[in-house]
Image (tube, helix red, strand yellow):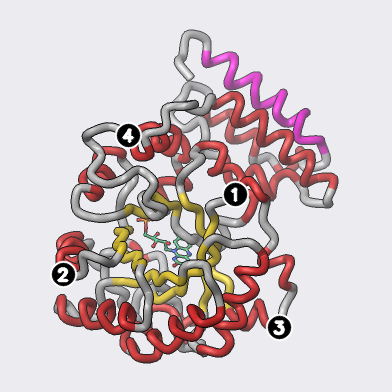
């Protein structure tokens, strides 16, 4: 631990990669774990309906290497959420997180996600039911407001009410969700980021663990947030530029043991692709998550083109790797890894 770190390095929520639908599946999380041993990883949101009426192993199976890993649930019915939290615990997840931040219309029709922020008492009931059902932490991810509600009091009352039900960890995406007129993508870009409101929450609720999310990625920006808050959650930057994670263990967790080696990470992903192929998973399902691994290096574009070339999908991953490597090697002479 270095003196510059504002809080103990073992804080479980110090850094995390955000839940992202279609992106943070188990293959993606396996890859991210090779880049950081300590960063907490979140699943994609799984709805209570999908879990209670669908294929549970398909939604919940994960690789042991992924720990610490949190399951994010979407739902608003306390009994169903409790049943799903129980499943999460049985499956070995380290945390179960309730989504109160997703603005999509489909989610609004299901009356969960961000629209739950206008029903803090219901969220409190959900949290209580989940906490009664499991021993693992039950956490909430939410926004700072919905639609045009700009007042701090709204998010303060939400957090206060949900905390009374026993929730001790809040991950706050520091912008409003506009429930009408914006697509989910626009809802991650258009409503302004207001970090100060999240800092104020921490000052007002010093005993709660408060992590901030939205627009972060650069190490210095993360470090600046950790001066005020217990944690930072990073979404798109971690996905698109995964190599940013390579410094996180050393800088944010005081663990200097091993800065990962980019080539070794790629080689391990090839072995992983081959293990998955034996279970019937085609390598492009895995490789699509690592296309940003060489961003910024010479030859990265050609390398990425090989790993995303579906005409090669009948080839084993090791053959694709050899082809991709010819580009990274040809252009990486004298280039630091
Ligand atoms: C493709 C994609 C899918 C997402 N899916 C979810 C989700 O399932 N649950 C959730 O709480 N947030 C979801 N989000 C929002 C992110 O978790 C995060 O709050 C948002 O991207 C802001 O963080 P960032 O600026 O670091 O990307 C998603 C974001 C993206 C880009």
**Sequence-earlier tag: 1 or 2:** 1
300 horizontally vs 54: left or right:
left
Residue 279: x %, y % from top left:
83, 50
Residue at image point 25% right, 80% down: 160
The Cα–Cα distance between marks 1 and 2, rounded to whole angstroms, is 34 Å
Instruction: Give the residue at mark 1.
Output: 66
Query: Can you say whether 119 is above or below 10 in the image?
Result: below
Disc 1, disc 4: CB below 8 Å? no
Q: In which quarter of the image is residue 100?
A: bottom left
Query: Can you say whether 30 is above or below 105 in the image?
Result: above
Considering the numbered disc 1 on the image, is that residue within a helix, a strand or a loop? helix
Residue 20: x %, y % from top left:
50, 60
Query: Can you say whether 63 is above or below 205 in the image?
Result: above
Residue at image point 37% right, 78% down: 166
Question: What's drawn in magenta, residue-wise?
Answer: 315-332
The Cα–Cα distance between marks 1 and 4, rounded to whole angstroms, is 24 Å
1 horizontally vs 269: left or right:
left
Disc 2, disc 4: CB below 8 Å? no
Disc 2, disc 3: CB below 8 Å? no
Residue at image point 72% right, 66% down: 58
**Sequence-earlier tag: 3 or 4:** 4
Considering the numbered disc 3 on the image, is that residue within a helix, a strand or a loop? helix
Prevalent SS, magenta region: helix
Considering the numbered disc 2 on the image, is that residue within a helix, a strand or a loop? helix
Q: Give the mark toward the camera: 2 or 4.
A: 4
Q: Give the mark toward the camera: 1 or 2.
A: 2
What label does residue 1 carry, if any?
A: 4
**Sequence-earlier tag: 2 or 4:** 4
Using the image as rendered, state which of residue 209 and residue 32 is in the foreground. Answer: 209
Residue 317 among magenta residues: yes
**Sequence-earlier tag: 1 or 4:** 4
Instruction: Give the residue at mark 2.
Output: 204
């Amino acid at each position: 631990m270095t003196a510059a770190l504002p809080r103990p390095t073992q804080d479980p929520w110090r850094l995390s990669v955000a839940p992202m639908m279609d992106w943070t599946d188990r293959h993606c999380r396996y890859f991210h774990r090779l880049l950081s041993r300590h960063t907490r990883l979140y699943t994609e949101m799984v709805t209570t309906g999908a879990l209670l009426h669908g294929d549970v192993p398909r939604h919940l199976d994960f690789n042991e290497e992924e720990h610490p890993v949190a399951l994010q649930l979407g739902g608003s019915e306390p009994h169903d959420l409790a049943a799903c939290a129980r499943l999460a615990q049985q499956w070995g997840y380290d945390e179960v997180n309730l989504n109160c931040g997703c603005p999509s219309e489909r989610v609004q029709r299901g009356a969960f996600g961000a629209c739950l922020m206008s029903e803090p008492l219901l969220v409190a009931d959900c949290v209580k039911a989940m906490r009664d059902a499991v021993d693992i932490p039950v956490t909430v991810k939410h926004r700072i407001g919905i639609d045009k509600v700009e007042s701090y009091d709204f998010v303060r009352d939400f957090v206060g009410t949900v905390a009374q039900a026993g929730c001790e960890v809040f991950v706050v995406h520091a912008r409003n969700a506009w429930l009408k007129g914006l697509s989910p993508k626009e809802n991650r870009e258009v409503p302004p980021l207001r970090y100060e409101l999240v800092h104020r929450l921490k000052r007002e609720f010093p005993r709660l663990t408060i992590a901030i999310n939205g627009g972060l990625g650069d190490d210095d920006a993360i470090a600046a947030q950790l001066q005020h808050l217990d944690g930072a959650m990073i979404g798109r930057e971690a996905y698109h530029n995964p190599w940013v994670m390579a410094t996180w263990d050393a800088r944010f967790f005081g663990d200097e043991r091993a800065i990962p080696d980019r080539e070794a990470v790629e080689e391990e992903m090839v072995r992983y692709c081959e293990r998955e192929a034996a279970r019937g998973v085609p390598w492009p399902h895995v490789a699509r998550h690592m296309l940003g691994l060489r961003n910024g290096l010479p030859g990265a574009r050609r390398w990425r083109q090989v790993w995303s070339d579906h005409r090669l999908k009948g080839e084993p991953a090791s053959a694709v790797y050899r082809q991709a490597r010819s580009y990274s090697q040809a252009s990486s002479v004298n280039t630091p890894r």
